[in-house]
Image: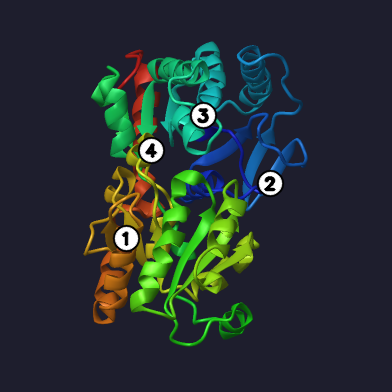
């Protein structure tokens, strides 16, 4: 069975989007499927027209789209569809599996209808809400409403739809789409990549000025406003009232970088927060080894209530303690007090209390880490979750061959 995945961007770029894509395609390969990817104009990386990355093959869409907003995106879809046409004509996939944003879905829908190929559309986030979350959009604006309308168009035109979590699925059902058409393929991890946790990297600890026994709270990822890192920094003086040696390690970068650094410089003890900047992906495990508790203080918003993040799952797979704000996306991933700690969103004091409580109960850490690891293995391992796709692919192909038309996911 040949599956063509239609993507915004892919490896060798690194992002949560590309890591999920890699996991899906690798798991499908292991299940015996023949898979390829085709990326749109927003894969901003130099490379050949057909590129292999980590054993996966990706076709690239060259060029750029110009013009005023609206027309520019429509031209982008057309260029993407034209390039996809070459791949479809040459390779003849059995299923086209498009991944959000809706620009990918719209381009894929053109080809699926033209060649009578089943179309699966997968939503990882509503991109109009993501734009609000990262500060590039405004809720209710013309662009927001147009993006939402295009998403609705693709969902209506797809043969089957997947979302990564219940929050997104429930929202689509509220819009009037039939529940039977929408399946869930939850965020997951490739458990084959995770073994026993690595030992503490003492050389890196010394380089960063961390002494043995100092409690280390950490965040590794992108610095967007919705991640709530300002609340985490504000929680540090409160946490240090009980744990004076506690340190906060922030690994990464992003739009909020300078504002967060300025906030940290204004703390009573600026040295309690350590910024590393972005680090190579191959080095990330060294930083994980220093962290006692991975903190994810996402602010409450439509985006964070509807979408489940990947990072907490990766932390639990690495047998690291997790503390997260009680937004809907986190509550769908973990149970507070069992798999980690949940604390009130937008509340530095509540965050500090939850972190202090974790640090005060070290005897509970092994059981909590074991429960979290088992939870990820049972519900978020791609080796088993890939079966959700296979059932739908087979059903859609059989329905198309028998002339029954579209089936539910």
Judging by the rendered image, the residue that carries numbered circle 4 is: 389
Measured in 3D between alpha carbons, the distance from the residue under mark 2 to the one under mark 4, in whole angstroms, is: 23 Å
Camera-nearest label, 2 or 1 = 1
Q: Earlier in the sequence, mark 3 or mark 2?
A: 2
Q: Are marks 1 and 4 in contact (CB under 8 Å)?
A: no
Q: Distance of mark 1 from mark 3, alpha carbons?
A: 36 Å
- Quote the CA–CA distance across marks 3 and 4: 19 Å
Q: Which residue shows up at 41% across the image and 18% down it?
A: 152
Query: Would you identify the image quadrant in which residue 107 lies?
Result: top right
Which residue is nearer to you in this view: 268 or 86? Answer: 268
The residue shown at (47%, 54%) is 230
Q: In the displayed structure, does residue 143 sit left or right of residue 279?
A: left
Q: What residue appears at the point 64 percent right and 59 percent down from the top-left corner?
A: 278
Left or right of 319 on screen, residue 269: right
Dot 3: what SS? loop
x, y (%) of residue 146? Answer: 49, 16
What x and y, as percent, mark residue 166?
Answer: 28, 37
Q: Secondary structure at mark 1?
A: helix
Q: Nearer the viewer, residue 383 or 213?
A: 213
Residue on which disc 3 sits? 101
For marks 2 and 1, the one nearer the N-term is: 2
Q: Position of residue 52 (x, y in %)?
A: 68, 46
What's the distance in space between the residues labelled 2 and 1, CA to CA?
A: 48 Å
What residue would you read off at disc 1? 349
For disc 2, the marked residue is 52
Q: Are marks 3 and 4 in contact (CB under 8 Å)?
A: no
Judged left or right of residue 347, residue 224 is right
Q: Height in image: 166 above or below 366?
A: above
Cα distance, mark 1 to mark 4? 43 Å
């Amino acid at each position: 069975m040949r599956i063509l995945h239609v993507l915004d961007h892919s490896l060798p770029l690194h992002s949560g989007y590309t890591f999920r894509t890699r996991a899906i395609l690798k798991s499908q390969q292991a299940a015996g499927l023949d898979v390829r990817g085709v990326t749109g104009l927003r894969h901003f990386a130099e490379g050949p027209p057909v590129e292999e990355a980590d054993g996966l093959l990706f076709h690239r869409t060259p060029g750029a789209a110009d013009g005023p907003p609206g027309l520019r995106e429509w031209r982008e879809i057309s260029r993407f569809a034209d390039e996809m046409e070459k791949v479809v004509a040459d390779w003849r996939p059995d299923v086209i599996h498009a991944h959000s944003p809706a620009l990918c879905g719209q381009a894929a829908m053109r080809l699926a209808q033209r060649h009578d190929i089943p179309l699966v559309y997968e939503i990882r986030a509503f991109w109009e809400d993501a734009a609000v979350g990262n500060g590039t959009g405004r809720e209710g604006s013309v662009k927001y409403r147009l993006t939402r309308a295009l998403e609705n168009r693709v969902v209506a035109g797809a043969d089957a739809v997947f979302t990564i979590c219940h929050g997104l699925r429930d929202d689509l059902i509220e819009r009037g789409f039939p529940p039977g058409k929408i399946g869930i393929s939850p965020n997951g991890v490739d458990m084959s990549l995770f073994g026993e946790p690595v030992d503490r990297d003492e050389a890196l600890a010394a380089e960063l000025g961390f002494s043995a026994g100092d409690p280390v709270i950490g965040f590794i990822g992108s610095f967007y406003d919705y991640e709530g890192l300002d609340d985490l920094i504000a929680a540090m003086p409160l946490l240090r009232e009980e744990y004076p040696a506690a340190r906060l390690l922030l690994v990464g970068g992003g739009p909020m970088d300078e504002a967060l650094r300025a906030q940290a410089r204004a703390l009573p003890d600026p040295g309690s927060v350590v910024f590393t900047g972005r680090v190579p992906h191959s080095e990330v495990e060294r930083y994980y080894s220093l962290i006692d508790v991975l903190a994810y203080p996402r602010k409450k918003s439509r985006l964070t209530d509807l979408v489940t993040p990947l990072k907490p799952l990766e932390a639990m797979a690495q047998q690291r303690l997790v503390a997260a704000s009680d937004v809907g996306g986190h509550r769908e991933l973990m149970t507070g007090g069992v798999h980690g700690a949940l604390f009130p969103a937008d509340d530095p004091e509540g965050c500090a209390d939850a972190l202090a409580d974790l640090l005060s109960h070290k005897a509970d850490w092994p059981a909590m880490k074991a429960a979290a690891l088992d939870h990820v293995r049972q519900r978020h391992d791609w080796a088993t979750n890939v079966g959700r796709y296979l059932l739908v692919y087979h059903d859609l192909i059989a329905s198309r061959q028998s002339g029954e038309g579209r089936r539910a996911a």
